[in-house]
């Protein structure tokens, strides 16, 4: 994904020294290289674990007191979180990653341990960004599967592990948060064994070693700690047992031949304000040096680009290291090639024999399941807040995004100015739209739909994407959740006790049934005591219409600035979405009606001033806090006849047809 050029705070710069330094040596032996990916379900501790490995390997240094002071948000300094004198979540340097506390993009770092270069790839844990996980599997020779000692294997655990096993990678397991009093280590180990067996792991893959760790406290060990027994803070071995396990269990890339011509599969595109576009991947064969000529070929073997290598970059800790040469087995970034792309092979055009250069094998990407139509903004406030407004600007940016975000598909829309975007989920597309608005774009977003396809075995029947949901919820609220998902055509798979007072539920739900439920309704149903995660399971026959139970909308019938005087009586009609002094226009949705039908209201009315005094004092105006929805919540909430107006400063929900009379005529025509 191409996000705005990442920003590194001055504290992080002082700690990690991102400026590239010269380094010319090639790793003399592939036996001295280890390439490993950290994979896990969301919030199971991948990024924290990578932070500790960087810290204890000496790749980053402890901050001085002055640097820690600058890093505190209330001091006017940087915005990085600091723990024990170290910047945390160093791998999540994108602004959206920092704000949301999740990993969105896969990232690579390197550590030197016992004269061996260990390349570590940190991957996202959310299913919506699974495309990032699928791509990097071709770069590594082993994976560290991180599992929460309390939650155990979850939906994304199954997904990332299945991809690793399919590639033939050797996994090792890290049971994280093992020191928590709620940990269920014995049960988690049993669930993991069942998961490996279910996914068809080979005998070699089933022989996986297990480490018990606390990434937060910085230790790992081979023996399971006793529940309730505190581990000393100065645990003597730290992460050394995990480093040794990586060295002994992950195979070096000795199968890669350095005598053949150069070839590398691009798995990610990086941007640099000084160097330009760089292509990241692992060298599969041969050697490369500054000045070498390369060509780019797609999966079908067609030449799509070429160029001369201008810059080579490796990694050393968090530093970007400038190289003069590199060889098979190393993970590098190459600058100077034109018209490359993700899943494109960069190869030496010479030395391949009569057949010529051939593309490297790529990893299949799971299909997108959610579709959203995008239009240029045509509302009354169009052009007031954004600088990129035209359909051509939007089209060029989205096509550029699709070159790097392989899970995103851009298709023509129903009109010449519209586009259809297909992605993994509402969060996947929501992050993209949030990025666009920060870049100055204005656009309209249509309601999300499930991507349907015809049943090849039964003509006339449609298949729809089904999501496998894993829910951890307080037992008191489990019944409500199961009932709501059953109403959305869900099928209960398992229901079992988890940690004390909680239950773990697995249920298969149509993708369209989750669109309007996860953003807000689920949070209200569980009162903050539950998590819901889902992953694409497959296509199944369409399960029929779903009644989400949403009521009508409060629609503005006037243009102007809303007033507290007008909003106060409207609160009895439903839930408001706007504050007083908000600019509104006819057709804009300003609230949710308490009844099933839409209601037209005037939120701009002002109190008439006269020279006649009332006998009593004016009543004090009391306004309840409105329900302000985020972009993802708005996408999940909207109905079929609505659009979302997205600008750099605002997110507005509106009717697709603003004129009420035209909307009535369109509705009557649709009924006929």
Image (cartoon, helix red, strand yellow):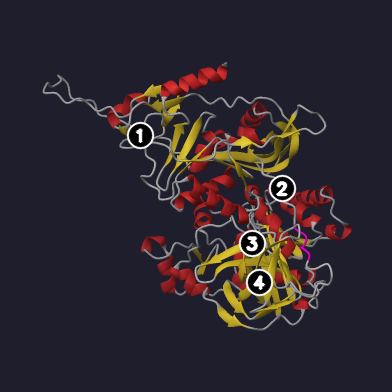
Q: Viewed as shown, does residue 557 lie left or right of 146?
A: left
Overall secondary structure of the magenta section:
loop
Q: Which residue is mark 2?
A: 366
Q: Earlier in the sequence, mark 1 or mark 2?
A: 2
Q: Which residue is mark 3?
A: 268
Q: Earlier in the sequence, mark 4 or mark 3?
A: 3
Q: Which residue is mark 1?
A: 584
Q: Is residue 227 visible?
A: no
- In the figure, 604 relative to 381: above or below? above
Q: Earlier in the sequence, mark 4 or mark 2?
A: 4
Q: Quadrant of the N terminus?
A: bottom right
Residue at 17% in and 21% down: 616
Say the numbered circle drawn on residue 332.
Answer: 4
Q: Earlier in the sequence, mark 4 or mark 1?
A: 4
Mark 2 surroundings within 10 Å by alpha-carbon count, few (fewer than 14), some (14 through 19), many (20 or more) = some
Q: Which residues are magenta?
A: 358-362
Q: Earlier in the sequence, mark 1 or mark 3?
A: 3
Spatial distance from mark 3 to mark 2, Cα to Cα?
17 Å
Q: Earlier in the sequence, mark 3 or mark 2?
A: 3
Spatial distance from mark 1 to mark 3, Cα to Cα?
42 Å
């Amino acid at each position: 994904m191409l996000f705005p050029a990442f920003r590194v705070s001055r504290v992080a710069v002082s700690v990690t020294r991102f400026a590239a330094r010269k380094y010319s040596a090639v790793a003399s032996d592939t036996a001295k290289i280890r390439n490993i990916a950290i994979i896990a379900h969301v919030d199971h501790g991948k990024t924290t674990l990578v932070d500790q490995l960087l810290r204890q390997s000496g790749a980053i240094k402890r901050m001085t007191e002055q640097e820690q002071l600058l890093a505190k948000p209330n001091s006017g300094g940087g915005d990085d979180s600091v723990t024990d004198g170290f910047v945390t979540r160093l791998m999540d340097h994108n602004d959206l990653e920092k704000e949301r506390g999740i990993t969105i993009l896969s990232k690579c770092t390197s550590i030197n341990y016992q004269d061996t270069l260990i390349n570590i790839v940190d991957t996202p844990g959310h299913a919506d960004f699974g495309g990032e996980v699928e791509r990097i599997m071709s770069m590594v020779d082993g994976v560290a599967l991180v599992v929460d000692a309390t939650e155990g294997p979850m939906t994304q655990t199954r997904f990332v592990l299945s991809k690793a096993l399919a590639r033939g990678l050797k996994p090792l397991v890290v049971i994280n948060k093992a020191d928590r009093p709620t940990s269920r280590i014995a049960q988690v180990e049993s669930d993991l064994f069942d998961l490996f067996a279910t996914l068809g792991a080979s005998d070699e893959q089933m022989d996986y070693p297990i480490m018990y760790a606390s990434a937060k406290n910085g230790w790992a060990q081979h023996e399971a700690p006793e529940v309730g027994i505190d581990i000393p803070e100065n645990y003597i071995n730290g992460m050394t047992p995990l480093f040794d396990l990586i060295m002994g269990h992950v195979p070096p890339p000795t199968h890669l031949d350095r005598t053949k011509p150069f070839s590398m599969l691009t798995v990610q595109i990086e941007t640099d304000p000084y160097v330009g576009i760089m292509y990241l991947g692992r060298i599969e064969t041969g050697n490369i040096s500054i000045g070498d000529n390369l060509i780019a070929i797609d999966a079908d073997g067609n030449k799509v680009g070429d160029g001369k290598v201008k810059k080579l970059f490796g990694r050393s800790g968090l530093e970007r290291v400038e190289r003069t040469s590199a060889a098979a087995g190393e993970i590098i970034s190459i600058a100077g090639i034109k018209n490359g792309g993700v899943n494109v092979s960069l190869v030496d055009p010479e030395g391949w024999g009569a057949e010529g250069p051939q593309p490297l094998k790529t990893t299949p990407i799971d299909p997108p399941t959610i579709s959203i139509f995008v239009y240029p903004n045509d509302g009354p406030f169009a052009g007031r807040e954004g600088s990129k407004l035209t359909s051509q600007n939007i089209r060029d940016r989205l096509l550029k995004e699709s070159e790097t975000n392989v899970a995103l598909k851009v298709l023509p829309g129903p009109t010449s100015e519209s586009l259809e975007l297909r992605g993994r989920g509402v969060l996947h597309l929501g992050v993209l739209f949030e990025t666009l608005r920060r870049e100055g774009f204005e656009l309209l977003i249509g309601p999300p739909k499930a991507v349907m396809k015809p049943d090849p075995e039964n003509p006339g029947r449609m298949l729809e994407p089904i999501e496998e949901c894993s829910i951890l919820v307080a037992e008191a609220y489990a019944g409500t959740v199961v009932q709501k998902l059953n109403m959305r055509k869900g099928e209960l798979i398992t229901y079992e006790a988890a940690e004390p007072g909680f239950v773990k539920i697995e249920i298969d739900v149509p993708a369209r049934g989750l669109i309007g439920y996860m953003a807000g309704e689920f949070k209200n149903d569980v009162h903050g005591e539950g998590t819901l995660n889902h992953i694409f399971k497959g296509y199944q026959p369409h399960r029929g219409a779903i009644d989400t139970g949403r009521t009508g909308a409060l629609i503005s019938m006037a243009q102007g600035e809303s007033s507290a005087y007008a909003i106060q009586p409207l609160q009895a009609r439903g839930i408001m979405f706007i504050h007083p002094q908000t600019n509104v226009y006819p057709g804009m949705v300003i609230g949710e009606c308490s009844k099933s039908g839409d209601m037209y209201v005037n939120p701009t009315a002002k109190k008439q001033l006269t020279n006649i005094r009332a006998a009593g004092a004016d009543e004090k105006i009391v306004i309840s806090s409105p329900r302000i929805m985020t972009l993802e919540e708005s996408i999940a909430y909207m109905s079929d006849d609505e659009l979302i107006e997205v600008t750099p400063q605002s997110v507005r929900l509106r009717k697709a047809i603003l004129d009420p009379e035209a909307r009535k005529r369109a509705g009557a025509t649709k009924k006929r």
